[in-house]
Image (spheres, grey):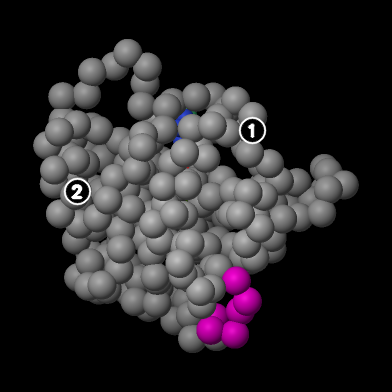
Amino acid sequence: MNIIFANQKGGSGKTTHCNLFANYLVLQKKQELLVLDMDFQSSIKSQWDADRENYDNPSLYEVIDIDLSESASLMDQLTNVEGHIIIDLPGRVDDDHLVPVFQKANLAICPFAYDQKTFESTLVTAQVIRHINPKIPIVFIPNRLKAGAKYKLTEQVNQTLAQFGVITPALPDKVAFQRIDTLTIPEDISQEVTQTYDFIYDRYLISEKVK
Ligand SMILES: Nc1ncnc2c1ncn2[C@@H]1O[C@H](COP(=O)(O)OP(=O)(O)OP(=O)(O)O)[C@@H](O)[C@H]1O
Ligand SMILES: [Mg+2]
């Protein structure tokens, strides 16, 4: 299955959840996967390189740095890969090189937050992905919810996004998300992360024969 992490809003949590979801699939669901880092910032690839240098533990998966301009030919070769392909995307949707990536994706995961700007970006992202790949399931992860904060837009945002896909249980703003690596799921966020990712896994991956 090809799973993309997308949202044109910078800093919405694509890389964080791409990394943690990959860890979750290997550690908790014993799945095989390959991570493609298509973001020019190469955050996951850098983290993976650092973890390989700093820890003796074997990597859970391989991470390959991909230039977006190579994505079209690459997506055609992916059919030979065993296991899931997990793809971290840059914070934009207006690059033509993304078209083959959206076309070949089987599931889109969009982390977002309940502020006006992020909502608008998330909506545009969903519209573009749906336009290019009309059948793709889209999953929205409410991310970085601050304890005690009131979000005026919650209902309106949920209603609008529900027209494009499903909304998972929300994830809190916790510093543990800023200290992740490519080897573990930090204990202090394990429960929340597992609940949210189980929601996605049970709906979209469990019955899916690995493509
Ligand atoms: N739930 C969370 N709680 C606290 N910090 C978080 C949470 N999710 C993400 N962050 C932090 O927010 C910042 C942005 O997250 P991340 O890099 O995953 O976003 P992104 O969508 O990949 O950004 P970009 O568009 O720049 O690629 C990072 O410093 C990350 O550690
Ligand atoms: Mg990123």
Picture coordinates of residue 125, whole percent (x, y): 26, 56
From this viewpoint, is residue 23 visible? no
Residue 1: mark: none
Picture coordinates of residue 161, whole percent (x, y): 19, 48
Residue 109 falls in image quadrant: bottom left
Queried on whether the Cβ of the residue with tag 1 lies below 8 angstroms from ligand 1, the answer reads: no
Going from N to C along the chain, the mark reached first, 1 or 2, is: 2
Picture coordinates of residue 147, whole percent (x, y): 37, 17
Residue 37 falls in image quadrant: bottom right
Asked if residue 55 lies left or right of residue 90, the reply is right
Tell me if residue 178 is in the magenta stretch.
no
Q: Residue furthest top?
A: 148
Residue count near mark 2 (Cα–Cα under 10 Å), binned few <14, some 14–19, many ≥20? many
Q: Residue at x 44, y 41 (%)?
A: 196
Q: Residue at x 50, y 37 (%)?
A: 193
Q: Residue at x 50, y 24 (%)?
A: 174
Tell me if residue 82 is in the magenta stretch.
yes
Secondary structure of the residue carrying tag 2 is helix
- The residue indicated by pointer 1 is 186
Asked if residue 138 lies left or right of residue 43, the reply is left
- The residue indicated by pointer 2 is 161
- Tag 1 near tag 2, CB within 8 Å: no
Range of magenta residues:
78-83
From this viewpoint, is residue 76 visible? yes
Secondary structure of the residue carrying tag 1 is loop
Could you tell me the amino acid type at mark 1? Pro
Picture coordinates of residue 104, whole percent (x, y): 40, 77
- Residue 100 to residue 188: above or below: below
